[in-house]
């Protein structure tokens, strides 16, 4: 289950009021990209793509954290009964389903780490998981950037970016381009692509 668009937008605004920062604008960019891509692929619901994209980083409502935003968002949305959106809070960071692929601070308890490992292992990824992974990998706050620029930015900020994760992101781009039958950046022209 996932919330309606209006409810998702309300939850994001509420989260931004609790912890202001560029994550809200980034989330809107992810949502706009996901909706646009889903609209060009039969079988995907653009509304669901928008909502789960908008809420993928909702755990940032709890404050300035790194790894913790993943589990915080999952628990917040599960508490509201939005299990499909909660799943995306977990999967968006793991295009390669391995906890070691996350870059940055491991600011969670060992118990939370074990729960994340279990969830990653149990989840079967679908095209919504893959779509948000891709959109997260091309979204700056307020604009779409090419995949390499975004991955390089993350590496600069956190000190590393695993090669396996880079390759997976490139595969995701090719996967969705094939499904759409067009170049990703052309498809997202409306979203403010900047090279």
Image (tube, rainbow, N blue to C red):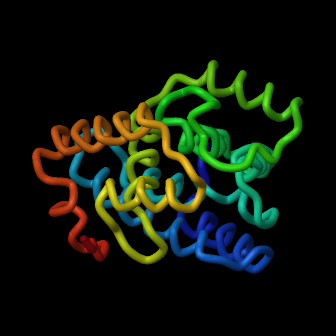
Decide if residue 83 is on the left or right side of residue 156: right
Spot occupied by residue 191 in the image (x, y as percentages of width and height): 31, 72
Decide if residue 180 is on the left or right side of residue 50: left
Q: Where 126 falls versus 140 (above or below)?
A: above
Where is the C terminus found, in terms of image quarters? bottom left
Q: Where 187 falls versus 175 (above or below)?
A: below
Spot occupied by residue 46 in the image (x, y as percentages of width and height): 36, 54
Q: Which residue is drawn at the image coordinates 57% and 52% (left, top)?
A: 159
Where is the N terminus found, in terms of image quarters? top right
| Residue 8 placement: quadrant | bottom right
**Along the line of sight, the residue nearer the viewer: 5 or 157:** 157
Question: Which residue is situated farthest in the left direction here?
Answer: 181
Spot occupied by residue 32 in the image (x, y as percentages of width and height): 39, 66
Spot occupied by residue 178 in the image (x, y as percentages of width and height): 16, 39
Q: Where 187 falls versus 80 (above or below)?
A: below
Decide if residue 134 is on the left or right side of residue 40: right
Tally the numbered discs: 0
Q: Which residue is drawn at the image coordinates 56% and 35% (left, top)?
A: 101
Q: Which residue is drawn at the image coordinates 52% and 23% (left, top)?
A: 124
Q: Which residue is drawn at the image coordinates 15% and 63% (left, top)?
A: 186
């Amino acid at each position: 289950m996932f919330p309606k668009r209006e409810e998702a937008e309300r939850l994001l605004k509420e989260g931004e009021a609790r912890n202001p920062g560029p994550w809200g604008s980034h989330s809107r960019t992810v949502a706009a990209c996901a909706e646009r891509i889903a609209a060009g692929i039969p079988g995907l619901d653009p509304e669901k793509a928008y909502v789960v994209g908008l809420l993928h980083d909702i755990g940032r409502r709890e404050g300035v954290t790194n790894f913790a935003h993943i589990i915080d968002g999952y628990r917040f949305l599960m508490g509201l009964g939005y299990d499909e959106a909660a799943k995306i809070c977990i999967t968006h960071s793991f295009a390669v389903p391995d906890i070691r692929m996350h870059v940055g601070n491991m600011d969670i308890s060992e118990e939370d780490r074990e729960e994340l490992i279990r969830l990653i292992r149990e989840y079967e990824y679908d095209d919504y998981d893959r779509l948000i992974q891709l959109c997260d990998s091309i979204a700056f706050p307020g604009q779409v950037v090419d995949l390499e620029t975004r991955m390089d930015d993350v590496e600069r900020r956190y000190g590393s970016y695993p090669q396996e994760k880079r390759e997976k992101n490139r595969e995701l781009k090719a996967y969705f381009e094939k499904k759409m039958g067009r170049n990703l950046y052309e498809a997202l022209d409306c979203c403010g692509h900047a090279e």
